[in-house]
Amino acid sequence: MKILIAAAVVAASLAATATATAAAAAGSGGASFLTEAMQGDNSETALGALAARRGSSEGVRRFGAMLAADHSRGKAEAEAVARKLHVPVTDRLAPEAVKERLKLAGLTGRAFDREFARYMVDDHRKDIAKFTAETSRPDQPAILALARKTIPMLRKHLSTAKGLAG
């Protein structure tokens, strides 16, 4: 009987710790950051794949393939952190990316390339700002590490997009 009570106390303690960790992630904005990060990765993967198929220039096609590959890896890393912090994983795209995908669907040739590059410059500037803000919050070490690891990739993408945008 004492063993069952001790086991129940240990189980309750572990459950409380997991709940507290998830609550800390959610309460500190960590959950919303992770959700947005996953949506961003989903978006860049989808838009990158679109550009890899439909871009009129070799540069846009290569950049699209790079985005799809890099953000697929980024999504896997963000998912691992989300699972660790008990944050639901999402396969949704960011709402603005859904709108951009529709806009790009109506464009071809140089117009497609220009719009794609313009959007990627704007989007990666925003992403860098969000990820940089997370590096100033040491309350979630796993999120801090993810943000620090992701920023160089985002900067590389921004630089590439700027080169394509002219």
Image (spheres, grey):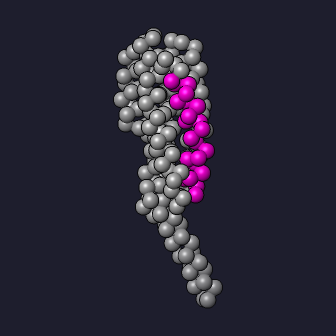
Magenta stretch holds residue 149: yes
Image x and y of residue 1, in percent: 60, 88
State the residue in front, 82 or 8: 82
Q: Is residue 19 above or below residue 143?
A: below
Q: Residue at x 48, y 59 (%)?
A: 25
**Residue 90 in sight:** no
State the residue in front, 122 or 89: 122
State the residue in front, 52 or 27: 27
Occupied quadrant, residue 65: top right
Image x and y of residue 130, in percent: 46, 44
Q: Residue at x 60, y 38 (%)?
A: 152
Q: Which residues are magenta?
A: 141-162
Q: Is residue 85 above or below residue 66?
A: below
Q: Residue at x 56, y 34 (%)?
A: 155
Q: Residue at x 47, y 28 (%)?
A: 120
Image x and y of residue 156, in percent: 58, 31
